[in-house]
Image (tube, grey):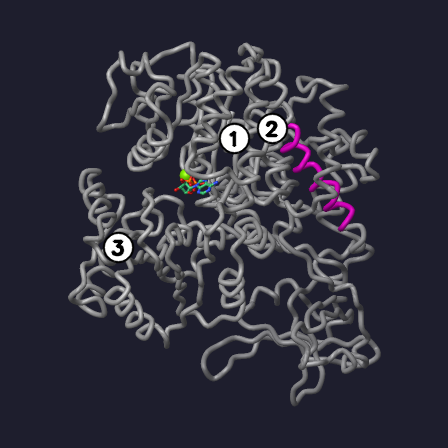
Amino acid sequence: MHLSDKIEALPKTSAITTSRLKSLQIETIEDFINYFPSRYVDYSTIVAISNLKHYFNPADDELKKVSVKGTVVSIKNEYTRRGFRLQKAVISDGSGEIEVVWFNQQYLLSIIHTGDMLALSGTVKFDRMGYSINPLEYEVIAGSKQLIHTCTIVPIYSEKVGLSSRTIREKMFSVLPMIEEKISALCPDKLAKKHNLIQADEAYRSIHFPMSFEKLESSRKRLGFDELFVLHLNSQIIRQRWQSAHVIEGFSFDEKDKAQIKKFTASLPFTLTGAQQRAVDDIFSDLAKTYPANRLLQGDVGSGKTIVGALGAYATKLAGFKTLLMAPTEILAFQHYESIRKLFKKEDISIALYTGSQKASASELEKADMIIGTHALIGSKFKSDRVGLVIIDEQHKFGVAQRMEFKGKAGMPHHLSMTATPIPRTVTLTLYGELDISIIDEFPPGRTLIKSHVVPLAKREACYEWIVTQIKQEKSQVFLVCPLIDESESETLKDVKAAKFEFEKLSKGPFKGLSVGLLHGRLKSKEKESIMNDFSAGKIDILISTPVVEVGVDIPNATIIVIEAAERFGLAQLHQLRGRVGRGEKKSYCYVFTEKVDDTILKRLQFFTKTSDGFALAEFDLKSRGSGDIFGLKQHGLSRLRLASYTDFELSKKARDAASSFLKTDVLEKYPRLYNKITEFENEKVSND
Ligand code: ADP
Ligand code: MG
């Protein structure tokens, strides 16, 4: 049998099983062996029946798993008074006898017969019949046939679409020895070997049927390395492509330009923070390159990314090129337009706005040094070969397709993406290795910490009352964020419904007599704008919103944010929401509501309330909930690692080295599987190339 054979080639497999496997996207034998166990149970301790008592410890959280082997003295069905059927067997191993009971598994009588040698694995139990075993797995011992369900480290496969773990295990065990070729991984063995990793063939066999936990670990390492290798290789290929694009003339700044930039920086109403200055320097050095730069600027909400982008635009103008800045929403585009225009004098730089509802004319676009807009810009007739810099704000808010289109529009200029999403460093290095990163890890001075608290159900009313007092006495304004109904990054109809419900309830209840507004994504953009304007002007006291609706504008007077059902959010996401307040001089507060009393949830939320560093929060999410929960990565299946982890820095480094040696000495086209994987990955990956 070969890896490329269709799944129908599995021996002794019914059509139903085959079709179930297919529904899990398992089409070939290769796909099948890539269906890895989700966990393992250690049944390798084999105990004599007379010794079972030594393994009984009900106080243990995790009951000890053991196995016994013996002869079936008898096996029969028994009916309980309630109509259940029990299967009772007596097993003897010479040292003693036990009775073993199954529930409603009549078919066992056609598999297990009196006189058979039987292996049983499970936990030890004690009742009026004495010590016995809860039979979690059984296996009839036939000659020297290797035991796979009992008496060893047993792989557990996640049971989906009606396929049992036992069935998958049996099929896997029978098919592995039948594969004629040496099983290879995507990363050639010779590269893995340099890093003391085992061969892929051995790793594939051991990941399914490990002889020891050491073997399992070395297999996991080898195959996890492979996953990371693909990510790194992809990044490095993209990076190479950018660097060989050479379409840009390196901007050269003469002394006059430099003096002008200096003068402009000095004219700002504030001094740049050290971190902002470093980011600006990074961008200036990007602009001098002869290949297009591809930089990600990460910085918390309020860390001052806009001015960094604006300085990039100014330098680009001085070099004689245009800058395009694309924002995810009209509100945000407009806010950038207003605030950047305020920073510059008219003769410094001319700026045009282009959104769905406010479209600069073709000649204005042609004249402008900087065009600020939304994705509407993609559909516009605007076309210029003088675009030198493209800035995408809040890049994670755009779909891959949108960014590609935007890129197509602008040609291949320098690229700067800005995001407030704190992606942990270990993730950026692995997943976004093609990007250069600048991080603004410092706030402008004078910013006070947002006081954050977890509010349990019992304290909710008191919290509402306190909020009402703050509104009345301090003229505070409040954001109230509704629960995330579906774990999705875009707004669903259910989210809107929940927000409407909350709005009705609260405006008639605790917030009666106050001015309460409702904001959600299904409102027309005019309505949204008018609500935001009212909130901004202080005409609305409390703004209730769906969890993911973009508020966009700065509301310095909003000092309180309440987040409902906070346990449903990732910490990084909560942090993002918290950033809506604390933008003014006044002290700000963040209240996270939860009805859950679960310890892990409370610990997570408490960590959030004590931590103001977005990267630390993202790192916490990564460690406690895995990469699937990192804000912005959720829907990208390919970035989900199955065996490796983004926190495994050592392994990732090895994979990166392997990827660069590969690029130096080999060609992708020689490895069709790897080639396909990389292409597939590139199409789906969130990347801002
Ligand atoms: P974000 O990183 O969230 O995009 P902004 O660029 O909108 O942040 O900046 C937030 C606020 O901080 C703005 O009002 C901006 O004018 C102000 N700001 C930016 N840099 C500084 C600085 N170095 N000192 C003081 N205020 C600053
Ligand atoms: Mg911003």
Q: Is residue 623 magenta?
A: no
> Counting residues from the N terminus, which is met first, the one under dot 3 or under dot 2?
2
Q: Report helix, strand or loop for mark 3.
A: strand
| Mark 2 neighbour density, 10 Å: few (under 14) some (14–19) many (20 or more) | many
Secondary structure, magenta segment, majority class: helix
Q: Is residue 316 above or below residue 202?
A: above
Against 194, is 79 above or below? Answer: below
- Location of residue 363 (image quadrant): top left
Please, which residue is most extreme toward the left here? 513
Looking at numbered disc 1 in the image, what kind of residue is underneath it?
Answer: Ser
Give the residue drawn at x 45%, y 39%: 270
- Between tags 3 and 1, which lies in front? 3
Residue linked to disc 1: 687
Mark 2–mark 1 Cα distance, whole angstroms, equals 9 Å
Question: x and y percent of residue 474 in the render?
Answer: 28, 64
Q: What residue span does the magenta drawing correspond to?
A: 217-235
The residue where tag 2 is placed is 434
Disc 3: which residue: 543
Are the two marked residues, 2 and 1, in contact with CB atoms closer than 8 angstroms? Answer: yes
Q: Which label sits in the foreground, 3 or 2? A: 3
**Secondary structure beneath label 1:** loop
The CA distance from mark 3 to mark 1 is 34 Å
| Amino acid carrying mark 2 in the image | Glu
